[in-house]
Amino acid sequence: MIYLNGQFMPIEEARIPVLDRGFIFGDGVYEVIPVYSRHAFRLAEHLRRLQHSLDGIRLKNPHSTTEWAALINRIIENNEGEDQYIYLHITRGVAKRDHAFPKDVQPTVFLMSNPLIHPAADLRETGVAAVTATDNRWLRCDIKAISLLPNVLLRQMAVDANAAETLMLREGFLTEGAASNIFVVYNDILLAPPKSHLMLPGITYDVVLELAEANSMQHEVREISEYEVRSAQELWMTSSTKEVLPITSLDGKPVGTGKPGHVYHRMYALYQEYKAEIMRA
Ligand code: PMP
């Protein structure tokens, strides 16, 4: 069952008018929220980021936090599977095609749940490959906008190179992956790029930094140069659906020893403990 504009229905029955501004302009925002053991993970943080995205595109939030939580919980109940991910999507609604905001139009609200497929366990031993590219996106990458054409093209570059992700560099510095945030271990210190308009403030990114802090792992949030990326001991990608994955090859060259490093293994274990802990709470 999915949710569309006030109604729950099978996805096959869901219809969107062709003049929806999501379809015509990519005028909307979204969220992806992982669900573990039928509990939405870090829901408050996801809803806070949603508000930030809505503010960024000047669209009024159609629901209160309590309403969102109720809708999300109903979607979870209506779908099978202990682990799911919720896809939440809001557009500026249906209106005659004109770039400027339409007046008195209801936003389109769509929610669906899909099974959360955990990355294969052997990837934690082998790692994944990544390539690099120039970050050619706009200057508001902190908005989780549904217009993802650059990200689609960038991710396809990775797929075409038999890799899992494309790391983006802007003016010589690391921003993020096509659909993930990137961490670097350099000189035994865990590095993360600072939040700015140039990257999405990842919920998983926050969890990783909180765990590093709570467990006294040496870490710094600062600009990371292309040189540091290319000479890193470890590279990781993080996202709600992939959690934390090691990148062991970059542009065809091994990262560090070419195997996931000890800092990665420690963080992976901490992440799993943290998940188990909050699901018990
Ligand atoms: N950056 C981009 C561009 C993304 O699309 C995503 C999520 N798919 C992330 C970072 C990671 O964010 P989160 O940890 O909240 O999933």
Image (spheres, rainbow, N blue to C red):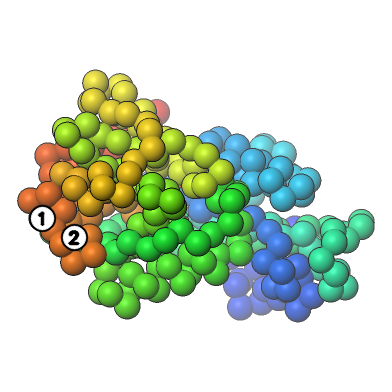
Residue 234: x %, y % from top left: 19, 45
Q: Amino acid type of disc 2?
A: Ser
- Tell me which residue sits at (53%, 59%) in the image: 137
Rounded to the nearest angstrom, the CA distance separating label 1 from label 2 is: 6 Å
**Residue 155 seen in the current view:** yes
Of residues 202 and 33, which is closer to you in this image? Answer: 202
Query: Mark 2 — residue?
Result: 249
Determine whether label 1 and label 2 are within 8 Å by CB.
yes
Residue sitting farthest toward the right: 104
Q: Secondary structure at mark 1?
A: loop
Residue sitting farthest toward the front: 171
- Tell me which residue sits at (85%, 61%) in the image: 100
Is residue 127 toward the left or the right of residue 30 in the image? left
- Tell me which residue sits at (55%, 51%) in the image: 141
Of residues 279 and 43, which is closer to you in this image? Answer: 43
Ligand 1 lies under 8 Å from the Cβ of mark 1: no
Q: Amino acid type of disc 1?
A: Gly
Query: Mark 1 — residue?
Result: 258
Residue 227: x %, y % from top left: 26, 47
**Residue 272 seen in the current view:** no
Count of numbered tags: 2
Residue 235: x %, y % from top left: 24, 48
Of residues 4 and 30, which is closer to you in this image? Answer: 30
Mark 2 is surrounded, within 10 Å at the Cα level, by few (under 14), some (14 to 19) or many (20 or more) other residues, namely many
